Image: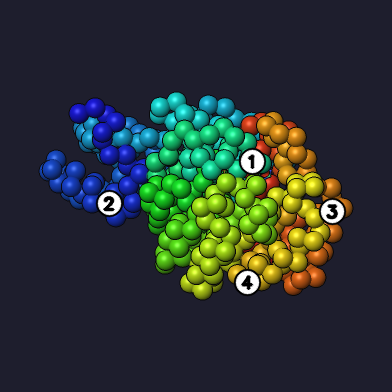
Amino acid sequence: MAPSTHPDLLSLEPDALHQALVRHFENRGQRSYRAGQVQRWIYEGLARSATEMTDLPAAEREALSESFRIDEPVVDRLSESRDGTVKHLWRLVDGHLVESVLIPTEHRLTLCISSQAGCAMGCTFCATGWGGFDRQLTPGEIVGQYRASRRWSEEHDRGAITNIVFMGMGEPLANRAALHPALTILNRGYGVGARRITVSTVGVVPGILELADRPEQFRLALSLHAPDSELRRELIPLEKRYPLAEVLDALQRFDEAGGKRITFEYTMIRDVNDALELAPRLARIAAQVRAFVNLIPFNPIPYQDWVPSTPERIRAFASALVAGGVEVAIRETRGRDIEAACGQLRAHALTQMGKARR
Ligand code: SAH
Ligand code: SF4
C-alpha cells in the first residue's frame, strides 16, 4: 500500500483515533494501553513521527509508521516582525504553501491559521482572493499548523498559544468537511477551549447554521465590510449567493443558540465603505444580532489601488457606531514589516484579543 493511503493520525478525531489505534495494537497482539501511549504522543508530545515515541518497543514504532502517517506541514520560511509577530509559511506534502501567524500581546498568544490553500471567494480587497483557489486542507493540515506553531513557540520561549482564529488563507466554512473535525480535534484532543477558537467567515450561510448547531461554544466572526447588499456585492462576490438578509438570519440562529458573541469585521477602505452615512445602518444590524464591531484599516494589496480610511474617519465612524449603541473597537495592523503577500492575517487575528478581554 502506498504511504499516502494510510490514515493520517493528525486528521482523525479523538474517538476515531483511539479506535484505530486500539484495533491496530489488537491485531498485533499488543495490549490496548498502547493506544493511549500513542494518543499522548500525538496530543501532548506533539510527535512528528513514530520514531519519537520512545516508550513504544522499536518493533511497534516501526509497525505504527507502516500503518499510519503523520502529515504535519513543514516550515518553508519564517519571518519575525519587530513587534514580535511571527509568520510561518508552511509547505504541505504536495508542495502547496499556506501561512499562519503568531501574534503576542500582553496576556495572550493568538495563532491565526489557514483553512484552504488559496480561496475561491474572490473578495476584491483580499490578496488571497486574487490568488485563486488551490485546494482544501485536510483536518491534519489545519491542526498541524497549530502543533507546529505550538512546538516552535515552546522552543523559543514564547509561551502557550491561548487563542486560535481562522483568519489566515481560505474560507473555513467552504471547507466544512475538514473544519468540523479540525475544531473537534483542537478542542477535545489538544484541549484548546472552544471559546478560544474563532471561525471567521465571509457569510457561508449553511456553514453558519452548522456551527450554530454544534454544542461547543466556538466563536464566530462575520466579515461584513458593508452594511447593505448593494455595496457588499462590490466587495464580496458571495453576497450574490447568500445575500446579507439571509446571512443575518443565520447569525440570529447562531446568537439564539446561546451565549456565543458574534463579531463583525469591517475593513475600512477610503471612499469605498467608510461614508459616515453607513454607520447608522451598520449599528442597526449589529444590534439585531448583538454583534461587536471591529474596525480594521484596509491593508493595501498589490492588485488594486485602494487605500485605508484616514484615522480621523475611522474614529468618527466608530463614534457614530457607539452613538448607535454598538460596542466597537479600532484595530491596528501588526507586523507590517513582514507583511508580504497575505496582508490580512495579523490585524484580524488581533481583533479576537480585545473581545476575549471583555
Ligand atoms: N475567509 C474568511 C477568513 C480569512 S480572511 C473571511 O473572509 O472571513 C480574514 C480576514 O481578513 C477577513 O475579515 C477579511 O475580510 C480580511 N481581509 C482580507 N483582505 C484584507 C485587506 N487587504 N485588508 C484588511 N483586511 C483584509
Ligand atoms: Fe477568501 Fe476571506 Fe479573502 Fe474573501 S476575504 S477572498 S473569503 S480569504
Could you say whether the residue bearing mark 1 is in a helix, strand or loop?
loop
Q: Nearer the viewer, mark 1 or mark 3?
A: 1
The residue singled out by tag 1 in the image is 124
Disc 1 to disc 3, C-alpha distance: 22 Å
Residue type of the residue flagged with mark 2: Ala
Disc 4 to disc 3, C-alpha distance: 25 Å
The residue singled out by tag 4 in the image is 288
Which of disc 3 and disc 4 is earlier in sequence?
4
Residue type of the residue flagged with mark 3: Arg
Q: Nearer the viewer, mark 4 or mark 1?
A: 1
Q: Give percent across and percent down for residue 39.
A: 33, 48
The residue singled out by tag 3 in the image is 313
Evaluate if marks 4 and 1 touch, with contact meaning CB atoms under 8 Å apart. Answer: no
Disc 4 to disc 2, C-alpha distance: 40 Å
Which of disc 1 and disc 4 is earlier in sequence?
1
Q: Residue at x 51, y 40 (%)?
A: 120
Choose between 251 and 235: the one closer to the eye: 235
Disc 4 to disc 1, C-alpha distance: 27 Å
Q: Residue at x 78, y 40 (%)?
A: 307
Tell me how many marks there are: 4
